[in-house]
Amino acid sequence: MDIPIIKPYITEKEIQAVKKVLQSGWLAQGKKVAEFEQKVAEFEGVKHAIATTSCTTALHLTLAAMDLKTGYDVLVPSFTFVATANAVEYTGATAVLVDVYKETYCIDTDKLKAFIEKNYCADDKGYINKKTNNILWGIIPVNEFGLCCNIKKVIEIAKKYNLQIVEDSACALGASIDGVHEGAFGNISCLSFHPRKSITTGEGGMILCNDEKMAERIRQLRSHSASISEVQRNSGKGYLLPEYNELGYNYRLTDIQGAIGTVQMEHIDYIIEQRRKWAKRYDELLSKKVEYLTLPYEPKGYYHTYQSYVCMVDMEKLGIKSIEDANIWRNDLMDNLEKSGISTRQGTHAVHTLGYYKNKYGYKDYDLENAYACDKLSIALPLYVTMEQDEQDYVIDKLIEFGRI
Ligand SMILES: *Cc1c(COP(=O)(O)O)cnc(C)c1O
């Protein structure tokens, strides 16, 4: 058996769509990107969608458009892909890491509030970091592995302290709470189309936004900050170059990718349904047969898209005392699975344990204990649309077998 962690779901239709674009002669951002944006906006229930080269650039572009800069703090959950925090640091602002819940892997809103109360004090500019004098700017909650964070609580906290919110929804296209999709919670949010996510364009990202002015500003910054002046607009002199009055970027998606994305959006309901089907089958069988794993949690009213099926090794059930020893046990398990042709990964990493953040800000592993535990104990199991029942059964059998050692 050779069971990968994920297989992107690509059909003949995507291949034909790419061929058409290549034959058309228009390869850079154009009609196909616009069509893709329109489809995602409709699906998520938002007014504007702006495609970018990745979720990382989507986050950076959003923060740049919101004028984030040096002297500001942004609160980011530590258990997330490093890009969430990096996007903050690109602007010169400081990513301040906070802890997560072990059950949902999302930002711990009780600790978030306590953290602000403890480390910031109010003055006329806002909430000031007692150590660095930075001004608290906002929060980037992450809708992790296809599950929305407790966004209601995050919004409540943001209102109380007058903070901005940008949602990292890299993994969460189609995720919802009480039927409201992740893009429609009233904040700007950013998606990823990397092959590990629900739908893919190879690389790619998108910003979802309801504010027309902000959408326009993001579009302009995405394209070198090019603007057509009123004179040009009215004189019809198409040969003149636009104006460039701000430091812009080139974060544009290609029409080749736009064509893939447009077809991928035709499959989105099927992709999520299939992922949920396999996830629920894991739930059912693992809960009966594999005691040492804590399975992903889907709170009531939440719709999980299972971008990853992430479990935790249960230290207590294994009778292991320390996170470090349990980490050795988990890595042995992953090693054995790998040797049996089953690919697994840890869920994601704890950003505060990574070199750049550790060295720059002096974090200790246990400063954010849940994020640290998630880093050391999580295991994502293979899950993809075209998974076969015997493949999933094989994964489960091996989990039972190696769990006995
Ligand atoms: C994948 C991922 C990103 C980065 O997305 P790219 O499109 O690869 O840049 C950012 N944040 C989270 C939570 C992710 O899972």
Image (cartoon, rainbow, N blue to C red):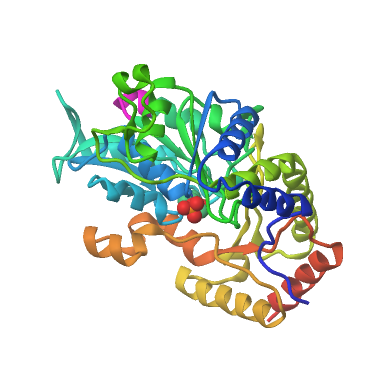
Q: Position of residue 175 (x, y in %)?
A: 62, 38
Quadrant where the N terminus sits is bottom right
Could you say where residue 306 lies in the image, as x and y percent from the top left? 66, 49
Q: Is residue 218 left or right of residue 210?
A: left
| Predominant secondary structure, magenta span | helix
Q: How many marks?
A: 0
The residue under the point 49% across, 66% down is: 376
Q: Quick check: 171 left or right of 166? A: right
> Visible in this render: residue 297?
no
Q: Left or right: 43 with respect to 189?
A: right
Q: Nearer the viewer, residue 245 or 188?
A: 245
Q: Considering depth in this image, is 283 or 13 the residue closer to the camera? A: 13
Please name whichever residue, 273 or 56, is drawn nearer the observer in this view of the structure.
56
On screen, 156 above or below 271?
above
Farthest-out residue, top: 234
Q: Does the magenta stretch include residue 161?
A: yes
Q: Is residue 32 magenta?
A: no
Q: Position of residue 11 (x, y in %)?
A: 76, 54
Q: Is residue 11 above or below residue 341?
A: above
Residue 125 visible in this rendered orientation of the protein: yes
Q: Quadrant of residue 76?
A: top left
- Which image quarter holds the C terminus? bottom right
Which residue corresponds to the image point at 48% horizontal and 23% vertical from the top-left?
210
Give the extent of the magenta segment.
158-163
View extreme (right): residue: 390
In the rendered image, residue 93, in percent from the top left (x then y), is placed at: 24, 45
Residue in view at x 40 percent, y 26 percent: 216
Please name the residue shown 44% across and 42% down the image.
108
